[in-house]
Image: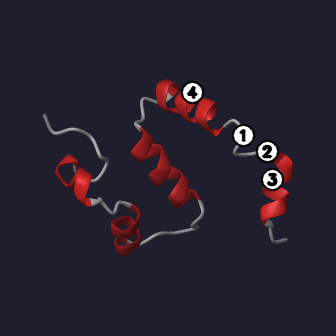
Amino acid sequence: MRIEPSDIRELNLLKHYRIIRKWACKNYELNDADLELLIYFDCMDLFTREDFKIGTYVPNYARNRGYTYKSTS
């Protein structure tokens, strides 16, 4: 069964994303980047090192923060 965008809209999954994100980060001691990476990998059965590199792509503004966007200082 394929999920269509209208299905997601009907379920209102993204309506409470901000609250759920804050709850998950606080309760599991994650930062936003770690949570997003977990969501990215959850869609895959198995992932490779290359998938990890793609999932942890660091934009120019965050290049010095490392794979999980954590501050190095």
Whether 59 is drawn above or below 51: the answer is above
In primary-sequence order, the first of circles 1 and 4 is: 1
Secondary structure at badge 1 equals loop
| Residue at 84% across, 59% down | 7
**How many residues crowd around disc 4 within 10 Å: few (fewer than 14), some, or many (20 or more)?**
few
Q: Viewer-nearest of labels 4 and 2?
A: 2
Indicate the quadrant where residue 19 lies. Answer: top right
Whether 4 is drawn above or below 21: the answer is below
> For mark 1, what is the residue?
15
In primary-sequence order, the first of circles 4 and 3 is: 3
> For mark 4, what is the residue?
23
In primary-sequence order, the first of circles 3 and 1 is: 3
In primary-sequence order, the first of circles 4 and 2 is: 2
* Image spot of residue 20 (x, y percent): 62, 33
Secondary structure at badge 4 equals helix
> For mark 3, what is the residue?
9
